[in-house]
Amino acid sequence: MTARSSRCHVLVERPAKEPTAASPGEIRAFAKCRNERLRLPAFLKHYRDLGVGRFFIVDNDSSDGTTEYLADQPDVRRFTPSGTFREAGGGTEWLNALLAEFGEGHWCVTVDIDELFCYPGSEFAPLRTLTTFLDRHGYEAIGCLLLDLYPGGPLAACSYKEGDDLLAAAPYFDAGPYDRIPIDLCPGFLIRGGMRERIFYPNFRTRGAAARIYEGVRGRVTRRLPRLHNVRWLRPTEPPVLTKVPLVRWDRQTRYLSPHWVSPKPVAPVTGVLLHFKFLADAQSRVAEETVRGQKYAGAAEYRRYAQTLADRPDNGFLYEGSTQFAGTQQLVQLGLMHDAQAWSEARTGSHA
C-alpha cells in the first residue's frame, strides 16, 4: 500500500508481521525516524500508555536496528519514503501524506521519536479523556512547548540504555526564560528560549537592534515560505522555535505547514509540553552525522552550531544554578510552561459530566 501527497512524496508500506485490527475512533500516532533504536521502546511505551491505538512511522533509511524493531511491533505500520528528508520539507510532506491517507476523522498525535507528549493531569487522564473533552468544546488542536530535558552531568556520562526511563536519565530542564510571541499561524504563538538558547545561542538576548529587525523580517518571510530556509543568506541565526502542535483532529483540509505550524484549527486554551530527549550520550555522534548529511533544516545550520559548541565543551554538561528537576505536570503548570483550564480539570477528575 502506498500513500501519496500533493507533492508526490510516495511512501511504500512495509507491513508488520501480524498487524492488529483497527478499532473505531482510535487515536493514531504519526512519526518519522532515522536510527532511533535507542529511544523507540520508551517512545512506544509512553504513547501506548496514553492510549494510542496505532502508529504510522516513516523509517528513513535506518541502519541501527530500528527497521527490524519496528517490523516486530504489531501496532506499527512502517513506511519507506521516496526522495530525501530535505526535499520533503524536513519530512513534513511525508507526514502530511500519511495523515491524509490514514488520519482523516481521527485524533492524531504527530511527534518525533525523542518527544513525549504530556498535558495537565496526563499522569492519570488518558488521551481519550482529553479528546472527549476537546470534542465536547469544539477544539481541534492543542499547542505545546518543546521542553529540552538533559542529564545532571556530562552527556558522555549519561548511562541511558534502551528501554530505560528517559526522565530518570535526563530529568533537568530550564524553567526559563522563554519568550511567547503572538503570531498569525496556528496555534497562534511562537516560543523561544530555554536550554538550547542558553547553551548554543548565548548572545541572542543581548543582540543589537539591527539584528532584531533583520531576524523579525526574515522570520516572517520564512515561516510563510519554509523552503527559503535553504537559501544561505536567509538561514536563521536565532535559537530554534519551540512551538509544536502535536495533537490535532484531522480532516481533509488539514496539513502541517512545517514541523511547528498547522493549517488553521480551533485551538484549546489548555496547552501541553513535549518532553524533548535529544541530548543523551549519543548526541555528539548524531549531531556530527547530521552535519555531514546536511539534510536537516536550513542546510543543518543549527546542527553545525551544536557540533561546534559540543566540541568546545566536551567535559561540560548543561546543568546550571537555574536547572529544575522534573516533578510532574502540575509543576509545569505552576511554572507557566503549560496552561490548565477549570473545565479540563473538572473533566479529568470526573466532576463534570
Image (cartoon, helix red, strand yellow):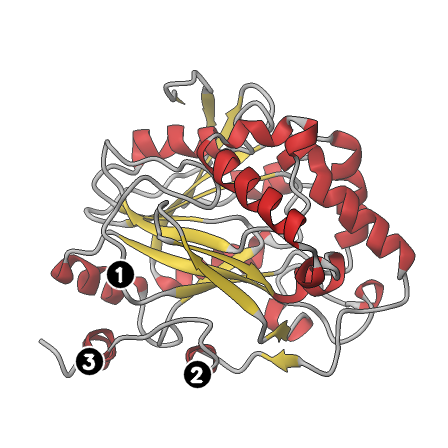
Q: Viewed as shown, does residue 349 lie left or right of 256?
A: left
Query: Which is in the foreground here, disc 2 or disc 3?
Result: 2
Relative vertical location of residue 63 with respect to residue 318 in this rendering, above or below:
above
Disc 2 target residue: 334
Dot 3 alpha-carbon crowd within 10 angstroms: few under 14, some 14 to 19, many 20 or more:
few
Disc 1 target residue: 268
For mark 1, give the secondary structure.
Answer: loop
Q: Viewed as shown, does residue 52 lie left or right of 229?
A: left
Asked if labels 3 and 2 touch by Cβ distance under 8 angstroms, the answer is no
Disc 3 target residue: 346
Dot 1 alpha-carbon crowd within 10 angstroms: few under 14, some 14 to 19, many 20 or more:
some
* Lower position in the chain sequence, tag 2 or tag 3: 2
Residue at figure coordinates x 46%, y 46% from the top left: 260
Q: Viewed as shown, does residue 126 lie left or right of 95?
A: left
* Lower position in the chain sequence, tag 1 or tag 3: 1
For mark 3, give the secondary structure.
Answer: helix
